[in-house]
Image (cartoon, helix red, strand yellow):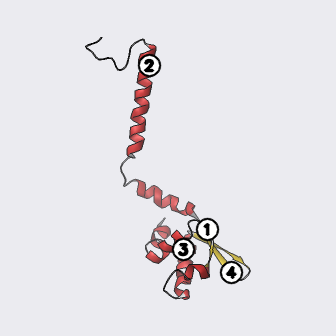
Amino acid sequence: MDEVAAAITDPVRRRILELLRDRRLPAGQIADQFEISRPAISRHLRVLRASGLVRDTVVGRQRLYELDPTRFAGLLGWLAQFTPTDLWERRFDALETEVYRARRDRRAGGSPYASKESA
């Protein structure tokens, strides 16, 4: 997890990950997206490979890079402790409770929405 966190601290590396989100790209095409030197991009790619966030495959004379999103799992799990319980999850749980309560009341012959005055 620490390697992943360290790797994504740099904005260039984050942008590289965004570029690789949907498809594999050769190193040259990645480098063309930046105004820094190819050796600098190569160093960033090396850090991303070392963290396991990207993997490379040599095809002919090209080195193709692709994202390995499974490496984010540990970091995401750790970050989850800092976010409040999912609001939608709580709402769906409350809805489920109401659905069960309405079914139970219907089976018992009563209306779950009848007011006390009409009862």
Which residue carries the number 3 mark?
A: 48
- Nearer-N-terminus badge (4/2): 4
Query: Residue 92: percent from the left, percent from the top?
Result: 42, 37
Residues marked 4 and 2 touching at CB (< 8 Å): no
Mark 4 to mark 3 CA distance (whole Å)? 18 Å
Q: Name the residue that disc number 4 marks.
A: 62
Outermost residue on the left side: it is: 117
Work out which quarter of the rendered image holds the C terminus and state it. Answer: top left
- The mark nearer the N terminus, 1 or 3, is 1
Q: Residue at x 42, y 11 (%)?
A: 109
- Kind of element beneath mark 3: helix
Indicate which label's residue lies in the foreground, 3 or 2: 2
Disc 4 from disc 2: Cα separation: 65 Å
Picture residue at 42% right of the left edge, 36% below the top: 93
Q: Quadrant of residue 48?
A: bottom right
Q: Earlier in the sequence, mark 1 or mark 2?
A: 1
- In three-dimensional space, the C-alpha distance between marks 1 and 4, rounded to whole angstroms, equals 15 Å
- On the image, the x and y values in percent for residue 6 come to 45, 72
Real-space Cα separation, disc 3 to disc 2, in angstroms: 55 Å
At label 2, counting other C-alpha atoms closer than 10 Å, the crowd grade (few under 14, some 14-19, many 20 or more) is some
Name the residue type under label 2.
Answer: Arg
Which residue lies under the disc numbered 1?
Answer: 23
